[in-house]
Image: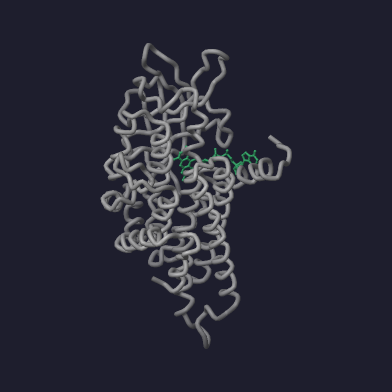
Amino acid sequence: MTASASTYESTFVESEERRDLRAAVRALGARYGLDYLLSCGKEHRIPEELWREAGKLGFLGVNLPTEYGGGGAGMQELAIVLEELGTAGCPLLMLVVTPAICGSIIARFGTEEQKQRWLPGFADGSVRMAFGITEPDAGSNSHRLTTTARRDGSDWLLSGRKVFISGVDASDATLIVGRTEDARTGKLKPALFVVPRDAPGFEYRPIDMELHMPERQFQLFLDDVRLPADALIGDEDAGLLQLFAGLNPERIMASAYSTGMARFALDRAVDYAKERTVWKTPIGAHQGLAHPLAQIRIELELARLMMQKAAFLYDAGDDLGAGEAANMAKYAAAEAAVRAVDQAVQTLGGNGLTSEYGLATLVAGVRVGRIAPVSREMILNYVAQHTLGLPKSY
Ligand SMILES: Cc1cc2nc3c(=O)[nH]c(=O)nc-3n(C[C@H](O)[C@H](O)[C@H](O)COP(=O)(O)OP(=O)(O)OC[C@H]3O[C@@H](n4cnc5c(N)ncnc54)[C@H](O)[C@@H]3O)c2cc1C
């Protein structure tokens, strides 16, 4: 552990139990690291060994109810798991999706059968579920979603298209955000459906991305996919509520993904700046390098505090408060991560761009945080309208 890593733990916001969890995850991450993740990325395969081991140790389902094999804790703990794996250089993107989005929605709104069917596998690592909301013609405007489900007897027929959906090839099913027609008003309202990977009419094609992450992104084509009645999660009339129950955890976990990567990059930069000497003193003594690193450490700590606030509010059941905090945390964490990786590359000079140090490969990876799961501009829109009460332009 570098000197800077130890100070990420504080009794101010974290109990001894949470700090123990941090230490345990850090020990697991140290056995895998960035080289492992990059080798999975080259082979386009999910980091299965790390995923399974994290499942066995109870890390994947730490937020899920104990009755279904989980740890009975919350988003604060799940964020710790992802942040510490990221700090070790091996963040698991599917943690954002399977236990955080899908696990939260099913645990809160699923029927007893749905919980029994999915949650134990999410917790032990034997089952993964992807999440598909983004559509090619809707983008950031989720009011334009056109993936639609219609009833056929007791079944559903689901048709539409999705884009940029992560990890579909390595998931048993995808939770698809579609719409159903309100029988009374004829209006379309959101509804969530579990679509098994091998369902007839469901096709997924990988998108070539300039990213080095193991999890690939896919285009999805749903052509009258026939689903049984219980593919619909929870209540047909509570789709919006259910969706938000998943989107707040998604943003909190996206923050954890970014803060983990930022810590990884900052640690590498600080270690290097302490050792590398080209004049009389190590390069870290020059304020031109030291101050940007110090600034990033401050911005990172602020982002982590906001993430912890968002997770606290979510775990306390304050979905509205969590929404604002999760947006702010995601924004701050993505900005800190982009700056951290950029400054780490700068600190290492030529070595910042070598494969040996692995920092340049993170440039695109942290850049994702400014776009997904919700873009920087859409967060600024949210804060402008909901927090500041300013008028809307779109
Ligand atoms: C690596 C990766 C993984 C992903 N994984 C998933 C996944 O698993 N599941 C899933 O559903 N989606 C996933 N996504 C999709 C992601 O959520 C979308 O890319 C994101 O929501 C932005 O949508 P878009 O790409 O269509 O951009 P657009 O909506 O087309 O936006 C383009 C640009 O216009 C800006 N813009 C749009 N509207 C406004 C406005 N009103 N005001 C100001 N600026 C605006 C945006 O901020 C952005 O900069 C992933 C994306 C990436 C890159």
Q: x and y percent of residue 336 in the render?
A: 55, 59
To which quarter of the image does residue 358 belong?
Answer: bottom left
Q: x and y percent of residue 327 in the render?
A: 57, 46
Task: Examine the rendered structure and indicate whether residue 161 appears above or below residue 331.
Answer: above
**Residue 88 in view (yes/no):** no
Q: Residue at x 55, y 13 (%)?
A: 184
Q: Nearer the viewer, residue 200 or 174?
A: 174
Task: Give the image's coloring scheme.
Answer: one colour
Quick one: quadrant of the N terminus?
Answer: bottom left
Q: Determine whether, in the image, residue 371 is placed left or right of residue 76.
A: right
Quick one: quadrant of the C terminus?
Answer: top right
Task: Examine the rendered structure and indicate whether residue 33 appears above or below residue 135.
Answer: below
Q: Nearer the viewer, residue 340 or 309?
A: 309
Q: x and y percent of residue 386 in the render?
A: 66, 41
**Residue 382 in view (yes/no):** yes
Q: Determine whether, in the image, residue 328 is placed left or right of residue 50.
A: right
Q: Residue at x 32, y 41 (%)?
A: 122
Q: Residue furthest top?
A: 153
- Ligand 1's image quarter is top right
Q: Residue at x 33, y 29 (%)?
A: 112
Q: Residue furthest bottom?
A: 280
Task: Examine the rendered structure and indicate whether residue 277 appears above or below residue 182.
Answer: below
Query: Total label count?
Result: 0
Task: Examine the rendered structure and indicate whether residue 2 appears above or below residue 51.
Answer: below
Q: x and y percent of residue 380 in the render?
A: 64, 46
